[in-house]
């Protein structure tokens, strides 16, 4: 494919051919319908019986099936041609755009793609400083447009050849062949539903050409960006589009919220709160919070990459409810070590900036552990706000519904990490804080997660009595609780567990029990010996928010576990 | 860093007593630090810029005394992060730190660096932190709560690094209104 061929291609001719096929297909369909009504149905109703009738009826039935298959095959040709017109037009528009930009930048593009420009500052055609960089960028865009056209050409050609072979060999008259072609067509046209096995999604994605992938991403960024099984780079590309759309949308909604209603209105016995004002305030707070979260993500995505600020990938995003986002520091598909951090109560789009800071710190800590070991391995830490977290301690976080509702989403995401990872298997850690540990515990217990290490920070219980019940090697389950963290006060409300705590306390005080036990609202405290987890040390004075403090014991230990430096 | 092999850090008895004695109050308190901590957090501090300047001042003094120079590629920017994010508040305090790496340094140089580091900072009032590991010299200034760590000092480590971090401070010195 050269520039002139694509530039001059009359794509309208493909559309005309497609329309002709449509006409043919429609006419053929009418003939099939007519044949069915006028011949097959009449013959069936003719009361003709006997062996000859049976033979004829069977053949007519077969013929009906063959004609239906042929009708479908014709429609596939039409679809292939429509697809060809669309993709060639897209490639052509990319080429024209690049050539227009070249012209505006005073760059001359030769038919073979070579780009020249005037370097003489006094010349009226002087291309300006930085012309070379602009030329390289234009050249890359031209190459990409030509490749796009080549890929479209190859794929459409293969599809048409297949259909032509079906037609000439007669296999296209076979209902099974038509069904297969229909399935392939459907798969090409439809994005797998959310919840589809990530391995199947990955297979579907790999079966698409780059141009098709781009087309799906352009047309449905919200679906592609949040679909488990799509590689990180593609999810990121799609979600960045959705993020910008959401940013504009949230700002628009804020700007059009309308005037603030009066706080008080007249009631039977004086002024009372105005429900309209409360609703206005609630909407405004939610929109502003979500916009803050979007801005925090946007800022992190745009941060110049350096050792302290690794590249960031947006692996999930939406503004439903309190909003969700999944942000990876470094690419999890290529990293040697991957950690998913699940925050707890209060986690939402609006507060994700703080959680991304923690991911940054964990990557830095893991890098430090690797450097100390002389190990060049890379680490990605993902902040997973992919669930609806409780937003209050009382009453929200007292219920396990939030954890139960998150199980499938977390499992899908962890399976996706495995499905899309490139190269050797990676060391996979799931690390959670506070209610996030309950989410992780429930998901491990009820669904299973393909992880190597489990880190439970400041947990109010994880739904099991012992680390071995989490379905992973208990020697790879770690827990931490700071000496100034009030999480140990989140005791259970159930009478038996509450009584067990009191009995254990009295027994321990009396010296009758030498193995202290303790239950919290969502299960046994993971830091008691009977739970069977390994302890992560914490620095003195560690409160509920302090585990990621710089130079803290706990942050260093998290880095070691994530980096696979704790055997 | 040594991770304990068994659950030896279970809550101590007095903490458990507190938990069973005051169920309702306890659950309500779950979201927060202790009541006395909140006024403590509201107190005015140095500003974030002042804290950064202090970090750089400490780093400059330390680097001047060390027998090795940091790798040019290792001088990272300040790493700011928010404090108290999972507590009821007050919110808005920040802390920051800055780190330099020295690469793989001979043990004798590490020892010399450790001694120089310790001598300088302890002379300035820093004290040994109780949570230091065998691979690091961790010192904390009891007055301004800054922490300085020379990490990777053992023979096993293949990277020596220096980090100074601040306590939580209000970016403008006082709580935002």
Image: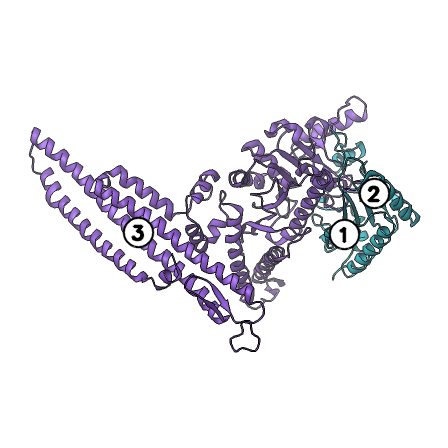
Chain colours: A purple, B cyan
Crowd around label 3: few <14 · some 14–19 · many ≥20 (10 Å): some
- Front residue of A264/B3: it is B3
Q: Which residue is mark 3?
A: A79
Determine which of the numbered discs, if any, sits on residue B98 in the image.
Answer: 1
Q: Which residue shows up at 89% across the image and 42% down it?
A: B115
* Vertical side of A240 occupied by A193: above or below: above
Is residue A429 toward the left or the right of residue A482 in the image? left
Dot 3: what SS? Answer: helix
Q: Earlier in the sequence, mark 2 or mark 1?
A: 1
Label 3 chain ID: A
* Both labels 2 and 1 in a single chain: yes
Residue B92 x, y percent position in the rendering: 73, 56
Label 1 chain ID: B
Dot 1: what SS? Answer: strand
Cβ atoms at labels 2 and 3 below 8 Å apart? no
Q: Which residue shows up at 17% across the image and 36% down it?
A: A62
Q: Which residue shows up at 84% across the image and 49% down it?
A: B145
* Both labels 1 and 3 in a single chain: no
Quadrant location of the N terminus of chain A in the rendered image: bottom left
Q: Which residue shows up at 81% across the image and 23% down it?
A: A511
Dot 2: what SS? Answer: strand
Residue B8 x, y percent position in the rendering: 77, 29
- Front residue of A68/A325: it is A68
Quadrant location of the C terminus of chain A in the rendered image: top right
Is residue A515 toward the left or the right of residue A162 in the image? right
Give the quarter of the image for residue A469. top right
Give how far apart the Cα atoms at labels 2 and 1 are.
15 Å
Q: Which residue is mark 2?
A: B138
- Front residue of B19/A76: it is A76
Residue A480 x, y percent position in the rendering: 72, 36
Label 2 chain ID: B
């Amino acid at each position: 494919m050269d520039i002139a061929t694509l530039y001059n291609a009359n794509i309208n001719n493909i559309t005309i051919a497609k329309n002709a096929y449509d006409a043919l297909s429609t006419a053929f369909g009418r003939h099939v319908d007519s044949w069915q009504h006028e011949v097959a149905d009449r013959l069936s109703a003719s009361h003709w019986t006997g062996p000859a009738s049976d033979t004829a009826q069977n053949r007519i039935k077969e013929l009906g099936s063959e004609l239906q298959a042929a009708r479908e095959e014709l429609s596939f040709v039409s679809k292939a041609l429509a697809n060809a017109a669309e993709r060639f037009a897209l490639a052509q528009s990319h080429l024209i755009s690049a050539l227009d930009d070249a012209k505006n930048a005073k760059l001359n593009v030769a038919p073979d793609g070579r780009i020249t420009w005037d370097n003489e500052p006094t010349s009226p055609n002087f291309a300006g400083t930085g012309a070379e960089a602009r030329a390289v960028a234009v050249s890359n865009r031209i190459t990409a447009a030509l490749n796009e056209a080549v890929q479209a050409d190859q794929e459409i050609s293969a599809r048409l050849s297949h259909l032509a072979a079906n037609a000439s060999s007669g296999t296209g008259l076979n209902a099974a062949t038509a069904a297969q072609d229909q399935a392939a067509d459907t798969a090409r046209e439809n994005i797998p539903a959310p919840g589809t096995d990530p391995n199947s999604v990955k297979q579907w994605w790999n079966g698409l050409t780059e141009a098709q992938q781009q087309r799906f991403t352009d047309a449905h960024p919200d679906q592609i960006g949040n679909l488990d099984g799509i590689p990180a780079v593609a999810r990121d590309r799609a979600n960045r589009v959705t993020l910008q759309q959401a940013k504009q949308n949230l700002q628009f909604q804020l700007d059009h919220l309308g005037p603030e209603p009066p706080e008080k209105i007249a009631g039977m016995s004086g002024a009372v709160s105005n429900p309209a004002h409360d609703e206005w305030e609630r909407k405004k707070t939610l929109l502003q919070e979500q916009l803050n979260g979007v801005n925090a993500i946007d800022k992190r995505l745009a941060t110049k990459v350096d050792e302290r600020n690794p590249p960031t990938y947006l692996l999930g995003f939406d503004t439903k409810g309190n909003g969700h986002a999944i942000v990876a520091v470094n690419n999890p598909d290529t990293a040697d070590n991957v950690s998913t951090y699940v925050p707890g109560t209060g986690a939402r789009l609006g507060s994700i900036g703080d959680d991304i800071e923690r991911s940054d710190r964990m990557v830095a800590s893991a890098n430090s552990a690797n450097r100390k070991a002389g190990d060049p391995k890379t680490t990605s830490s993902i902040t997973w706000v992919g669930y609806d977290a409780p937003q209050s301690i009382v009453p929200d976080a007292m219920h396990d519904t939030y954890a139960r509702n998150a199980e499938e989403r977390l499992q899908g995401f962890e399976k996706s990490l495995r499905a899309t990872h490139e190269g050797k298997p990676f060391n996979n850690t799931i690390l959670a804080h506070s209610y996030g540990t309950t989410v992780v515990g429930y998901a491990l217990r009820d669904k299973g997660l393909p992880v190597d290490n489990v880190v439970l920070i400041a947990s109010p219980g994880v739904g099991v009595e012992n680390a071995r019940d989490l379905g992973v090697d208990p020697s790879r389950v770690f827990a931490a609780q700071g000496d100034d963290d009030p999480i140990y006060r989140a005791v259970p409300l159930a009478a038996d567990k509450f009584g067990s705590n009191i009995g254990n306390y009295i027994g321990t005080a009396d010296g009758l029990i030498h193995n202290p036990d303790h239950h919290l609202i969502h299960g046994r405290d993971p830091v008691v010996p009977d739970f069977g987890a390994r302890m992560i040390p914490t620095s003195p004075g560690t409160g509920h928010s302090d585990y990621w403090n710089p130079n803290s014991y706990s942050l260093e230990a998290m880095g070691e576990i994530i980096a696979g430096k704790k055997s | 860093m040594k991770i304990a092999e068994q659950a030896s850090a279970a809550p101590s008895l007095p903490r458990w007593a507190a938990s069973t004695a005051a169920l309702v109050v306890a659950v309500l308190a779950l979201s927060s630090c202790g009541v006395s901590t909140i006024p403590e957090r509201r107190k005015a501090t140095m500003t974030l810029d002042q804290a950064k300047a202090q970090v750089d001042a400490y780093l400059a003094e330390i680097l001047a005394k060390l027998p090795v120079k940091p790798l040019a590629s290792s001088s990272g920017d300040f790493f700011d992060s928010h404090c108290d994010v999972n507590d009821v508040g007050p919110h808005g305090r920040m802390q920051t730190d800055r780190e330099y790496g020295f690469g793989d340094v001979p043990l004798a140089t590490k020892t010399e660096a450790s001694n120089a580091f310790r001598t300088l900072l302890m002379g300035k009032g820093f004290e040994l932190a109780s949570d230091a590991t065998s691979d690091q010299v961790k010192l904390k200034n009891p007055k301004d709560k800054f922490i300085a760590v020379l990490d990777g000092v053992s023979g096993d480590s293949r990277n020596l690094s220096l980090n100074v971090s601040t306590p939580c401070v209000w970016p403008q010195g006082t709580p935002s209104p």
